[in-house]
Image: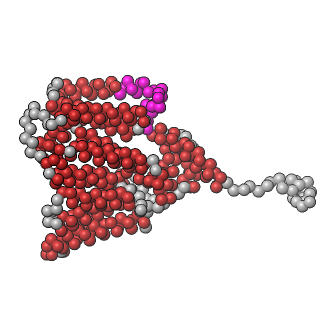
Amino acid sequence: MIAYNSQSLDNVYVQEQAGMAKNADCITAEEYNAITTAYPADLYTPNPYMRIGIFILTAIILLFSFGLFCLLFMAGGEGAFAFLCMLFGAGSYGLAEYMIREKKHYKSGADAALIWGAGIFLLSALGIATDADAPAWVWCFAALILSLYFVLRFADVSMSIVAHLSFLGLIFSGCVELGNIAKLIIPFMVMLASAAVYFLSVKLIAVHTYRHYKKCLQMLQVCALITLYLGGNYFVVREVSNEMFNMDLQPGQDIPGGWFFWILTVTLPLLYIYAGIRRKDRILICVGLVLVAGIVYTIRYYHSVAPLEVAMTLGGLAMIGIAYAVIRYLKTPRHGFTEASSDERHAMEAIQIESLVIAQTMSHAATPQPNQLEFGGGTGGGGGASGDY
C-alpha cells in the first residue's frame, strides 16, 4: 500500500540509527561508512530548510498554475471551476506518485505540498458540486477518507492529524444531527473515540508490519491524548455547550454534571504523567506535563486566586525549581530515568542494531586472502620445494 520502497525505508532507518550512534561516539566513522555502504538508500531527503523551501516553491507553482487556468476558463462558470479543481486534484496526486516513484522523493517538501494540494483541490470540487450545502458530517467523512488514504499511501504525519480531527468531527457532527439527546453525550463520545484511537495506535506501533507508519502512529497518540483531555475539560465542555447548544449559562452557573468534568480536568494530566512514569512512555509524560497548563488555565479562568502577573511569576518560579531539582536528582540514573539528552538514549538503544549490522557488513565485505605461505618452486617460502606432493 505504501508508495515508497519498503527496503529503502528500512535502510533509511538503519542509517539514521547509525548516524545517532556515530554522533554519540558509539561507533567510528569507518564503521558508519561501512553501514551506509552495506545499506544504501536511494531516497532524496534534503535538510529541513530545503524541505521548507521546496514545499513553498511547489505550493506557489500549484497556485500560479491554477490561477492561470482559472483566467482561461472563467467564462465557464462554476462547472468549469469544479472541473479545474478535480483536474488539479487528480494531477497533484499523480505528480506526487511520479515524484516518489521516479525521482525518489521522500519527505522532500514537494511530496507534502502535492499531497496537500490534491486534498484541498478535491474538497474544493466537492464544495462547488454541492453548493457548500452539504451537512458537516459529509465534509468530515470526505476529509477522513482522503486523509486516511494519504496516510496509508504516503505515511504523511500531518495527514494523520487531519484524519484524527476529521474522525472526531464526524462523530461530533453526527451527534448534533441526531438531536438534543445525542448532544448530551458528545463529550463522552469524543473521549471514547480518542481513547480508542490511542489504544489502537499503541497496539499497531508494536507490529513490525506497520513499522513505516511509526511517526504517524506516534502523532496519533499525541493527538488522541490531547483530544481525550479536551473532551473532558470543564472549560471546553461548558463554553462549547453554551455557544453551540444555546444553554445561555450566566457567569457562576454550572453545567449538568460539572463536578465530573472538574475531576477529569484535574486528574487526567496527572494520570498521564503517572502512567508515563510507570511505563517509561515519553509521549504520556510530555503530553501530561503540557496539559498541566490546561489545569492551571481552567482553574484560573473560573476561580481567580491571584492577579495574572503574580500567578504566572509564581508558576514559572515553581516550574524552574522543580526542573532544577529533578535534573540534580537524575544526574545519577535512577529507576530507569536519567537527565541525559534523548538523542543519547536513542543512540544507546541503537547499539544492538549497529552491532548486528556491523557484523553482517564485515562478513559480507570480507574477501578471502591468498595463502602467502604456500610452497612454490625455488621461492624462499618453499625452500626449493614445489607446491605439489
Q: Is residue 334 magenta?
A: yes
Q: Residue 359's spot in the image, x, y percent?
A: 62, 48
Q: Residue 147's spot in the image, x, y percent?
A: 31, 58
Q: Please indicate whether residue 187 sits to the left or right of residue 289 in the image.
A: left
The quarter holding residue 338 reads top left
Q: Residue 35's spot in the image, x, y percent?
A: 56, 51
Q: Residue 174's spot in the image, x, y percent?
A: 20, 54
**Residue 73 against residue 15 in the figure, above or below:** below
Query: Looking at the image, which residue sits at the far front?
Result: 181
Q: Residue at x 22, y 43 (%)?
A: 187
Q: Residue at x 39, y 67 (%)?
A: 98
Q: Which residues are magenta?
A: 323-342
**Residue 311 against residue 129 in the figure, above or below:** above
Q: Nearer the viewer, residue 369 or 377?
A: 369
Q: Give the prevailing secondary structure in the magenta stretch.
A: loop
Q: Is residue 240 magenta?
A: no
Q: Residue at x 25, y 61 (%)?
A: 142
For residue 3, say whether it is visible.
yes
Q: Residue at x 22, y 71 (%)?
A: 84
